[in-house]
Amino acid sequence: MSDELPGNELKAIWHNQPTEPSTMTLKLMRSKVRDLQAKTRRQALGALAGPLAAALVYAFGMRQFPRLAHVMHPLFLIALGWSLLGIYFLNHEMWSPAMPGDAGLSTGLEFCRAELERRRKLLSRLLLWSFGPILLTLGTFLLALALSGAAGKGLFPNGLPFMALLVIWILAYFARRAKEQRILQREIEELDDLARSTP
């Protein structure tokens, strides 16, 4: 009987211990939220590529095709203005607060889910406010190539490899964004499952 007593006490102590969320889980959650916020900020800052690309192609196009300035100026200016507006609209409400240090697991899950939703919203906005102006800029440049090729300069046939690379780049961009959207959706669903299973 004395041999059974310590085992029973240990079993009772084991069963009666408090069931609180693991601090390691909270540390991992905070780390995940910080990583997601850093990725969102990097992606939002990547929107600076739109105005930069528009300005560079604008300058190059004006230098290469000075006789087509009356056609290219308005289109390049629209693309440049659009991309500058894009910086505002992409970064508007994209900066999220830091996760509180005393947040519990459920609050951490809410923060993580909110950051994933913010990233998904940013990805959908990137298409309109960053990628759209770049496409308009490149389209204007291709129009200039076509018009100058029609004028007898012969630049358009030489631009076919550039156009092929451009089409491949556009398709790769859409494939990458679709993959990122699927990954974000899967992470949101995993967080929802974890939130449902958390008491």
Image (cartoon, rainbow, N blue to C red):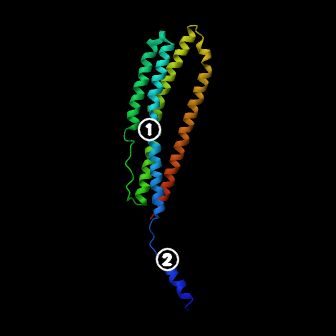
Q: In the figure, residue 75 lies in which quadrant?
A: top left
The image's mark for residue 90 is: none
Q: Quadrant of residue 19?
A: bottom left
> Disc 1 residue type?
Ala
Q: Which residue is drawn at 51% across and 14% down?
A: 64
Q: Please, is residue 120 above or below residue 106 in the view?
A: above
Instruction: Name the quadrant containing residue 86.
Output: top left
Please state the horizontal and vertical placement of residue 179, each as a whole percent of the image. 56, 42
Vertical arrangement, residue 39 with respect to residue 16, above or below: above
Place of residue 67 in the rendered image (x, y in percent of width and height, measured from the top left): 48, 9
Label 1: how many residues lie within 10 Å, few (<14), some (14-19) or many (20+)? many
* Residue 69 in picture, x, y percent from top left: 45, 12
Residue under numbered circle 1 = 44
Q: Which quadrant of the figure contains the C terminus?
A: bottom left
Under tag 2, what secondary structure? helix
Residue 61 spot, x, y in % from top left? 49, 17
Looking at the rendered structure, the kind of residue marked 2 is His
Badge number at residue 15: 2
Residue appearing at x 46%, y 77% in the figure = 16
Of label 1 and label 2, which has the lower sequence position? Answer: 2
Which residue is found at the position 52% from the left and 43% from the top? 181
